[in-house]
Image: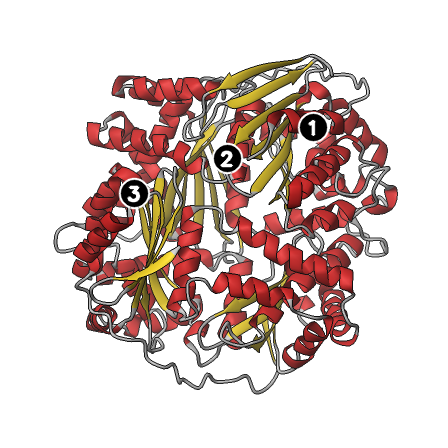
Amino acid sequence: MKKIYLENKIPVVFKENKNTPRLALCLYFKIEEQEKKAGLFSILNRLLMQGTKKRTAEELAMELDENAIECYSEMKHDFIRFKVLCLNEDIEKTLEILEDIVKNSTMEDFSKEVVKMKGEIEAELDSPKSRAADAFYKTLFDGLCYGHTYTKTLEAVDNITKDEVKEAYKSLLEKSPKVISLVGDFDEADMTSKLNKHFGNLSNPPKEANDDDAQKLNENKTVKVEKNDASQAQIFQGWRVPTIFDKDYPVLLLLNTILGASGLSSRLFVELRDKKGLAYVVRSSYEVYDRAAAFSVYIATEPKNIKTSLEGFEFEINRIKTTPVDNIELENAKNNLIGKRQFFTETNLQQSSLYSFYEDKGLGYDFEEKLIEAVKKISAEDIQRAANEYLKDPHVLTVLAPGQYLEF
Amino acid sequence: MEYIKKIEIRYPFLPSPVEVYERENGHKIVFAKKEGGLVNISSWVKTGSINEDDEINGISHFLEHLMFKGTHKHPAGYFDRTLEAKGAIVNAATWKDYTYYYVTLPKGPDNSYFYEAIELHGDMMLDPIIPEEEIGPAFELGDNTVKEKRERHVVIEEIRMRQDQPWTKVYNEANHNMYKSHPYKRDVIGFAETIASVPRATIMNYYGTFYTPNNITTIVVGEFDSEEVLKKVVEAFDFKGRKNTEKKCFELDKPEAKYVENYAHINTGFSIIGWLGPVACSIKENIGLEIANIILGEGQSSRLYQNLIEKAEKHIFNVVASDYYSFRDGGNFFVQANFKPENKEEAISLLKKEVEKLTNIEEREFQKAVKKLKVRFAESAETVSDIADTIGYYMTVCDNIELVEEYQKELEKISINDFLDIVKKYLPLEHAVVSVLMPEKKD
């Protein structure tokens, strides 16, 4: 693995995996300023695949499919990234199409895309879990772009204009720092030349210091969502916690593994599912953005179990705060976390995605190695301290259930 | 060591052929080689809802949960805890034709994790004790006095979860009406009432009937020495003379059109239009329906997306797609859509018209689909688990891994005329089963 720079100083992370049939490429555009109107970058992201000056949306989709090129863009609030996969022999064609999308998208289908997006959101909100998650994140990240959920987007999207989206696109091209990573079987010199040809003239200003002062939660908030035909209650409880830039990032990752993310042997799984039979799905999550992060616990359970489930959460969170994790559980969790990272970096695309993610964050493409070393050094005291420091009020609790069960 | 028959199969994008071993008792072992530090060990059992009736619907899936509840050697939780502490992903799944159990993990120092995983996986597969206290006491659904909530309740929660998913609801209704008398008509997860009350003895009897040597294929994918690993798998899978399962055959019903409509507290309309497909081992016909699926409803270049969303003059559809599930006795092809409920009739009519138009296709569309199918083998050779899944499918659903080679030959040969014949045979409108889920009617 190594890093080179294009003529315009875009960093490119290369990793050669010989004898693999498909190349994976990721191209990141950092979003430096938070989205002001919910849905603005989502529409921009969709319009990036909706036609260029050379290709209509249909022609673009057809050309990608005819060549079995997978190319899509994702908007994750802090960045828009393209993920691309193609057969090794099709790389030149793929880069030409990607360059066209990046530089020449027309945004002409704006109105149609808004209608399509609203329809898709409405369909998604017919899922009780999506509806509950929407209410949870909207509240937990209130005041931040990470709280721009489906319902926030529906409220704001009709006030977004085509000109605003075009301006955001222009800004993305001209003002956004960029990162590329490429993983697969290729010749480095040849690929450097190809990438320079297609992306070496993109504007690539240096990254600006992110000095936004993320709004904090000030008080506990409980959101109840009534859905009278729901068979299960959907319960999310969460806290705002430090991000990947904090020294406690590895500790929070390991805390998450122990509590509810190691698979079938985490504490929440064993205690609330195996022993109490409360749920099929119960877990914890640690989701990280640039300006904020969420640590949450989730359960889907029969509505009459709401109180027992909340007590179960409270018990397990108190336990991890008050009783040090024993050495065996600590070592097991470390091995689980470290071992599973191999599983999540098995394909060229997974690797490309991870290296560019770290590089985009300014942590360096080799951050993974540092992270693993940091995880190995975590002590039981670190876990207990982090649990006490971060899993404390204020919190957000969201419960979706039939009305009669919402008095708890 | 016992006599073990061996054949080799060429598998695209893998450096060496896939090795297929068959033991005297019928247990099959398959090795596929892929470079890297990860290995995948899985066992595929030829049973699922296909072997259930109304009395025991859901038992295959319930048993899958209970298989993790300990053996004579190791208590419940030991398997998960031990392997997950080595970075393993451990899980299982049940479908109509099969149930499979897998472990994906780093090989560990001197293959120590790998070898321990083979031993624990074999032990779990062959010696589950399924203790009463892990199943939990039988109870009548709705009885709020039950204190010991164990695995019965976990599975009932899984059933509840699915009841809240509109796509699952609308698909199940279509599926039930497509198969009518074939066991495929039943939802794999079964009914909460059955799970609440099925006795342990029935579960153990089911296990004894279907978890037999000729019904199980064990697959190992990764970088390893075949001779050494074969010895370890054989040792771990000592069936102790267990009696084999007799093959059962089920005929599909004659397809016929049907319309069913249900209601839920939702704001949009959901629909599935389904057709019965060919048997899994009819490779050419399966390829034909896979091509139909790509042309009709896969991705943004598909006809459904282009004609009903992208170029539509009126906004009716929020989501349109198609899919094809291949099953041993006959799969199903379906078109799924989410639409504005006030346009229900028009939506169903437009979807049907797009299927009807499949008898008119261009060379370019056809070639696009063929290329996509070829690249799928490259995709499925990227991870140890994907390789295992493909092999598991051919070994279990098709009962013949040599069909992997036939698939590639047929894909090279298939013509537009072949495709049109397959579409005419399997997707006529007079055979379409339509299932619709609509917002609850307001009084």
Q: CA distance from mark 3 to mark 1?
A: 39 Å
Left or right side of A110 for B44 = right
* Quarter of the rendering containing residue B431: top left
> Is B335 drawn above or below residue A287 in the view shown?
above
Instruction: State the mark number for residue A69.
Output: 3
First-in-chain label (1 vs 2): 2
Q: Amino acid at mark 2?
A: Lys
Q: Amino acid at mark 1?
A: Val
- Give the image location of residue A133, x and y in percent: 53, 65
Could you classify mark 1 by the number of other residues whose Cα lies within 10 Å: few (under 14), some (14-19), or many (20 or more)? Answer: many
- Give the image location of residue B243, x and y in percent: 78, 16
Q: Identify the residue at the far left of this view.
A: A54
What kind of element bears circle 2? loop
Instruction: State the mark number for residue B233.
Output: 1
Q: CA distance from mark 1 to mark 2?
A: 18 Å
Left or right side of B159 for A111 = left
Left or right side of B187 for B366 = left
Q: Chain of mark 2?
A: B
* Quarter of the rendering containing residue B393: top right
Q: Which residue is mark 2?
A: B34
Q: CA distance from mark 2 to mark 3?
A: 24 Å
Residue pictured at 65% horizontal, 81% vertical: A389
The quarter of the rendered structure image containing the N terminus of chain B is: top right
What kind of element bears circle 3? loop
Instruction: State the mark number for residue B273.
Output: none
Q: Nearer the viewer, residue A331 or B240?
A: A331
